Amino acid sequence: MKRIRVKTQSPYDVAVGENILPLIGVELKLLGFGGRALIVTDSGVPAEYVDEVESSLKREGIAVFRFVFSQGEQSKNQTTLFDILSAMADHHLTRGDFAVAVGGGVVGDITGFAAACYMRGIRYVQVPTTMLAAIDSSVGGKTAIDLPQGKNLVGAFHQPGLVWCDVKTLKTLSADNVRCGIGEAVKYGLLAGGSLWHSVKGGSYGSELFFEGTDLEQLIADCVEIKADVVCKDEHEGGLRKILNLGHTVGHAIEKLGGYTIPHGVCVAKGLVKLFRCLGENPALVREVEHAFDNYGIDHTCPYSADELIEAMRMDKKSGGEYISVVTVSEAGKPRIESFSFKELGEILCRA
Ligand SMILES: NC(=O)c1ccc[n+]([C@@H]2O[C@H](COP(=O)([O-])OP(=O)(O)OC[C@H]3O[C@@H](n4cnc5c(N)ncnc54)[C@H](O)[C@@H]3O)[C@@H](O)[C@H]2O)c1
Ligand SMILES: [Zn+2]
């Protein structure tokens, strides 16, 4: 098992290992968790994983309740949030009790937000079961729900007390979901450079890299380490944390224009390639990135015009006024944040 310490104001561990679900109860007991727990999950997460977590907690004398909502981003809304909060109240959770998110980013985001709100904040634990949740969303304490007007518009920073990632759970994921995680893994590889970039670009979908325990563990641990490092230097996204948006400024615009039908990680891939190609800083690196996505079977072409992308970006919540920042990497391991006016960026995006 690998452990990464996230040194935020209240620090916590991210544990990555194979067949570790049955051990979560003992770990939580050591960390002082007890009393009552509400496990939150969705209908697409195989029940056996939830059963394993539940049994493990019960063995430690914790009273466990379960809340299951319909899978999918469309459930990350106020109705589900209030249903979770009601379940917490119905099961008499108090400030000493906690929630456990077993699932992907949707489950993690909404459970974390419910935990941030309930009684002005109770503790929670992340048990990520998708690639995206394992390498990205379960770490860093960003929690949220969507509004009809946009994604993640209501949320809070609330760090988990533990992240417990069993790579065994990733073996039941659909190909699309694995690809979604790979989009983010390529992002981390580019941010870090070195051996992570080497192993990410050297992999291909279905290869041992992603399905044999040890390598998968290493890949996740390496990505988490980068996120942990950035997050603890900038817990509330004042500046540095923005580098985690690599591929996301254009990616979010593509996601929006596609009516949220293109998986998030695939939009990140498209956004990354589009921006890199247009900026034209390092054509050899662009080819490497494209080649990596090709190997994973990820379509990195961008189906939208520069005008359409700019219009969608203007509505992005992160853009203030006439300027927008994008993250670029002229060499793997050397990211930087650049600010452009929408007009300038529009001209750049016309180039390729
Ligand atoms: N908080 C953050 O920092 C952060 C970062 C990135 C993304 N996100 C959020 O994450 C969400 C996307 O997360 P996601 O890609 O994990 O999607 P998701 O949570 O919707 O999961 C995808 C699907 O996989 C199913 N599933 C989960 N685990 C499974 C397993 N082990 N085997 C088989 N099926 C399984 C789920 O039921 C779901 O239908 C978005 O809402 C996004 O906004 C948050
Ligand atoms: Zn992302």
Image: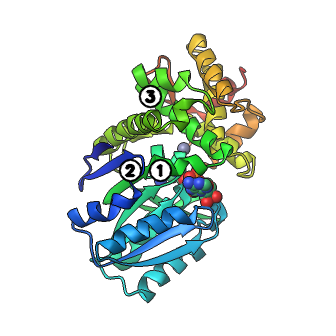
Residue density around tag 2, few if under 14, some if 14–19, many if 20 or more, within 10 Å: many
Quadrant of the drawing holding the C terminus: top right
Q: CA distance from mark 3 to mark 1?
A: 17 Å
Q: Position of residue 94 (x, y in %)?
A: 31, 82
Task: Find numbered disc 1 in the image and state the secondary structure of the residue it sits on.
Answer: helix
Q: Position of residue 38 (x, y in %)?
A: 42, 75
Q: Is residue 271 visible?
A: yes
In the picture, residue 195 is in which quadrant?
A: top left
Q: Which quadrant contains ligand 2?
A: top right
Q: Is residue 147 left or right of residue 327?
A: right
Q: Residue at x 77, y 33 (%)?
A: 305
Q: Residue at x 53, y 64 (%)?
A: 48
Quadrant of the drawing holding the N terminus: top left
Residue to which mark 1 is pinned: 137
Q: Is mark 2 within 8 Å of ligand 1?
A: yes
Q: Is mark 1 within 8 Å of ligand 1?
A: yes
Q: Are marks 3 and 2 in contact (CB under 8 Å)?
A: no
Q: Is residue 324 visible?
A: no
Q: CA distance from mark 3 to mark 2?
A: 17 Å
First along the sequence among labels 3 and 2: 2
